Image (cartoon, helix red, strand yellow):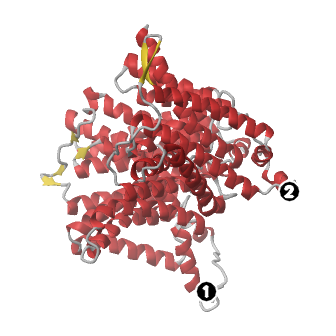
Amino acid sequence: MELFIQYTLTGLTNGAILALAALGFVLIYKASDVINFAQGEFLLVGAYIIYAMIAQFGLWWPLGMTFTVIIAIGVGVTVERLVLRPMIGEPIISVIMVTIGLSSVLQSIVKMTWGSQPKEFPPFIPTDPVKILGATIGADRLWAIGIAIVMLGAFSFFFRKSREGIAMRAVADDQQAALSMGISVKRIFAWAWSIAAVTAAIAGALVANIVGVSGTISSFGLHVFPVVILGGLDSIPGAIIGGIIIGLLETYTGGYIGQGLNQVVSFIVLIIILMVRPYGLFGQQIIERV
Amino acid sequence: MESGIFHTTYQADMALRRTHAQKIRVVLLLVAVVIFPFFADRYFLNLANQVGIAIVGAIGLNILVGYTGQISLGQGGFMAVGAYTTGLLTKHFGIPWYLSIPISCFFTALVGAIFGIPSLRLKGLYLAIATIASQEIILWVVTHWNVVTGGVDALVVPNPTLFGTLMNTDFNFYWIIWACVGLTALLTVNLFRTHWGRAFIAIRDQDIAASVMGINLFRYKLLAFAVSSFFVGLAGALIAHYRTIVTWERFTIDVSVLYLAMIIIGGLGSVSGSFFGATFMTLLPAVLTNLGRALKEYIPAIDTFIPYIQQASFGLVIILFLIFEPEGLRKIWNNIKDYFRLWPFSY
């Protein structure tokens, strides 16, 4: 039973991190119909910038975090302006490939700047073990759950109440109609990319705190796919619930079955979900017409 | 000064190569391919062999992505199936390489068709993600099915021989690889002059409309996956016998991305585009390495940066092509041809 609680807690926290990574992904898809294969690299960039701020420049962590967020906004806007804007109206495969190219460029920039060796990260969120129902878990992992919940609330509020959020939904629904209502689609895209970069930076900082800073962080990019497919590509609650389900599933299979099956179980689930519900648990079903 | 290409007979219109210039270019290319190995040293022969294998794989992927419009990121996995099948058949059952290669091609086609089943309900982004899943699942099976594949350890394939001659020297294998390239190109060009190929193209352009026209989507989508995987498996099998060592690292998702980049940079939905793209993407890292070596005298620190520069230029090339020439190298080649054909009135 203790083992079960341990797995559940670890799974939940893994799921929360996945959900955070997935949030940025869903946001970009919701606003611009672009699938961002570079989401994992956004996490990577975020993790290394916070590392540079805290470990290399020795800044106080809230200050470091603020700078990281500002830089992330810059990265998001630059990427949107230089790479994604020319892709508006291009076929899906071009958009996929351009984000793959972007991921390769971002990864090489990070490696050129910081080298490919893993870095020791001075934890800024307390990592002391906490006991819950007999299971032990790092406090930073609990933070991950808390931050995921806060972000979910913030995003739901943003999409329902704020001017930009509603405009973003309008753009996602129909770009031409949104344009004719006086919404600047370009500005909305810039918004979406910078917010996605910020969530990725926060998730990256959390991951850095929990597992340290290294190139492997970018593998979260691949792990996000089962999450968003399960939850539905355009659903924010879906990203959270999908993240938690996949996080639990991977931890349970890793714990009870082993054999490295946890690396692949989410992809098997992904194929099954795609066969049964191609638009995910909460995704919007699109009726195609010729 | 010509204003277009006109034919007066159906035969001329249906011909594979329709103009004199096209015929001359094909002959020149063939001559170049035949005389190349007699002048090249080992380094260039090795490069030529890599290019040849990449062309076979790229044509295979292009059948699926460029002609049928089913985006696939599972290329690496299917190459692994081809490589491991032929390797295991040769090693454990003693089947000679010239038999095990075709068998592995057919087996890869079967596996491809199975993983193509999700394509019946999915398209676009969702299909791309489903093929990533197939890539990960195949690679997981390869690395964890220890009894058969040897797990993460390298699979050592016996050297291929023919009448007592060792075939996997750079020079001897060159002929096998480029014969496969020729065969693959010829088969693919002709495939799209048949019922099957036309159906593939119809599915790419609009699959609902295609099914209204009486094309059985279930059948032809799976066929597209099978035909594509057949050639992809061939590329994998060639790697297995050329290197005689098969490891899973050769077939990761990076390989899938690399091949997708090849056909996009070369030109989607064209055999010549696959040639251009595969050649370009195979030679790019080699050129960069040599450039780095040449610059080493002036910038000593460049050595450590070469892998990163290769990775960055890989990404940059993709981004720049998609932004400035989405139709790829084939389009650039056509522009050059048109410029000279219509000279001096090229505008």
Q: Percent x, y for residue B124?
A: 62, 45
Residue on which the image places disc 2: A182
The chain letter for the residue carrying disc 2 is A
Residue found 54% across the figure and 73% down from its top: B332
For residue B267, side relative to residue B286 (left or right): right
Mark 1: secondary structure:
loop
Q: Are marks 1 and 2 in contact (CB under 8 Å)?
A: no
Cα distance, mark 1 to mark 2?
Answer: 46 Å
The chain letter for the residue carrying disc 1 is B
The residue type indicated by label 2 comes to: Gly
Q: Percent x, y for residue A169?
A: 77, 43
> Which residue, as the protein is rendered here, is positioned at the far bottom?
B344
Q: Percent x, y for residue B141?
A: 36, 31
Q: Percent x, y for residue A240?
A: 61, 30
Q: Specify the quadrant that holds the C terminus of chain B.
A: bottom right
The residue type indicated by label 1 comes to: Leu
Residue found 36% across the figure and 21% down from its top: A258
> Which residue, as the protein is rendered here, is positioned at the far front?
A60
Q: Which mark is residue B342?
A: 1
